[in-house]
Amino acid sequence: MARIDLDNIRHAYMPAPKRDEDFALKRVHHTFDDGGAYALLGPSGCGKTTLLNIMSGLLRPTEGKILFDGRDVTGLSTEERNIAQVFQFPVVYDTMTVYDNLAFPLRNRGVAADEIDRRVTETLAMIGLAERARQKARGLTADDKQKIALGRGLVRSDVSAILFDEPLTVIDPHMKWVLRSQLKELHRRFSFTMVYVTHDQTEALTFADQVVVMNEGEIVQIGTPEELFERPNHTFVGYFIGSPGMNVLPVVLDGAVARIGSHVMTLPGATGPVGAQRTELGIRPEYVRIGREGIPVTVERVEDVGRRKIVHASIDGHPLAAIVPEDEAVPAEPHVRFEPAGINVYADSWRMDLGEAS
Ligand code: ADP
Ligand code: MG
C-alpha cells in the first residue's frame, strides 16, 4: 500500500485551456495517507471520475504530478502503478467462469496456485458468489457481474491502492449495505489505501474515515463525517451534507452581532473586519429551536418524518428548516433561537473564524 500525493493537479479535456472554467479539475493538492479509507463525495460532473482516473493512471493530468510514497509516477501506467480499480459499470470476462475472472489477475502476476485458490475462495465468499464459482460470467445478472468486478478489485493483496468509482450503482439496496460493510471490514483487517467515489452522502459517511468533498472541480473540504456536519468549511458542504441541509441566511456582520433582515442576534464569537461581498450565517436544522422567544418566524408547513418533524419556516422571506421531536407542538406565535454550538458564519461562501475563545 502507498501514500499518494497529488501535487498541484489541474486537468482540462480541451486543448489549450485558459480560464478556470476550462478545467474539469481546477486545482487539487492533497495527500491520501497510506492505509486510509477515503470517500470522494460530490455531485455528478464535479470531477470525481477525472480525479480517480488521474490517480490510477488512465488519464494524464494537464498539469501537476502524482507521487506514490514520494516516487513520481505521473508517466506510469495503471499496471506499473499497481492499482486496482473498480468502475461504475461491470467490466468482466464473459467467457470465463466467475472463479477464473478473479483468479486471472493473480495468475498474471505469477501467484502460486494454492495461494490463488485460497484468495479467490475467500473473496468469493465475501461478495456472496461462492455458489456461482463454476458458472460462466456471461449468463449472470448485472449486479452479479458487478460483484465479480468488485471481487477482482479485492482479490490482490499487493496493490498500492484500491480505487472504487461508484461501484454499487447497479447493486440492489440491501446488497449495497452488505457489500459496503464488507469493504469497511476489509479495510479494518488489511489497511488497504482505499478511495471510494460516490455522490451519495450516506455511502460516503458510512464507508470513510475521511471524506473529501468536491464541487465544480475543486476540493472544498476534507474531514471526518463529524467535522463536515459541525463545521462545514464552505456553504456547499453545508447544503450537500445533512438532510435537510444547513440553512444559509444572508446576514450583515458587525463584530459579535449578526443582523438578519430587521432582526439582531448575538454570535458565539466576534468576526474581524469583513471584506467580503456576501456574508451568511449557517445553521443546521438540528440546531434551530422553535419556541416563544427569539426571532419571529412564519411556519409554512410541517413535514412528518418518523420520530421527528421538519418545520419549514421563514424569517423575513428567507427559508429556514428546523428539526423538532415528533411530540413537540409548534406555538401559535413561533420564534426561533439558534444553538450557539451550531452557528457558523461565511464570507463569500467560505467559513470565517469566530475567534472561538471569546
Ligand atoms: P463525476 O465523476 O464527478 O460525475 P467527471 O470527472 O466524470 O465527473 O466529469 C467532470 C467534468 O469533466 C464534467 O463537466 C464532464 O462533462 C467533463 N468530462 C468528463 N469526461 C470527459 C471527456 N472524456 N471529455 C470531455 N469532458 C469530459
Ligand atoms: Mg463519475
Image (spheres, grey):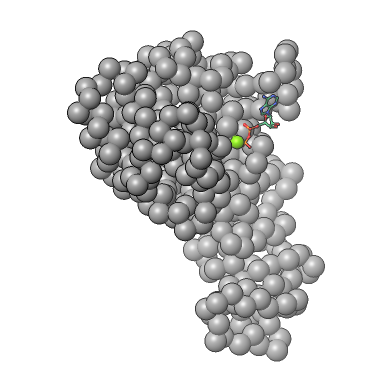
All told, the count of numbered labels is 0
Quadrant location, the N terminus: top left
Q: Residue 322 at what x, y percent from top left?
A: 62, 71
State the residue at coordinates (55%, 86%): 327
- Who is closer to the viewer here, 151 or 241? 151
Seen as rendered, the residue at the extreme left is 114
Image quarter where ligand 1 lies: top right
Q: Quadrant of residue 62?
A: top right
Q: Foreground: 324 or 144? A: 144
Q: Is residue 248 above or below residue 3?
A: below
Asked where in the image residue 14 lies, by quadrant, the reply is top right
Camera sees residue 152:
no
224 lies left or right of 325: left
Residue 186: x percent and y percent? 31, 43
Whether residue 349 is visible: yes
- Residue 358's place in the image compared with 137, above or below, is below
Q: Is residue 311 left or right of residue 191?
A: right
Query: Which residue is drawn at the image coordinates 28% and 39% (left, top)?
Result: 121
Q: State the residue at coordinates (28%, 44%).
A: 188
Can you tell which quarter of the image residue 43 is in? top right
**Residue sitting at x 36%, y 38%:** 134
State left or right for residue 250 relative to residue 146. Answer: right
> In the figure, 231 relative to 62: above or below?
below
Q: Position of residue 71 (x, y in %)?
A: 37, 14
Residue 11, image x, y percentages: 62, 21
Q: Nearer the viewer, residue 172 or 352?
A: 172
Q: Residue furthest top?
A: 75
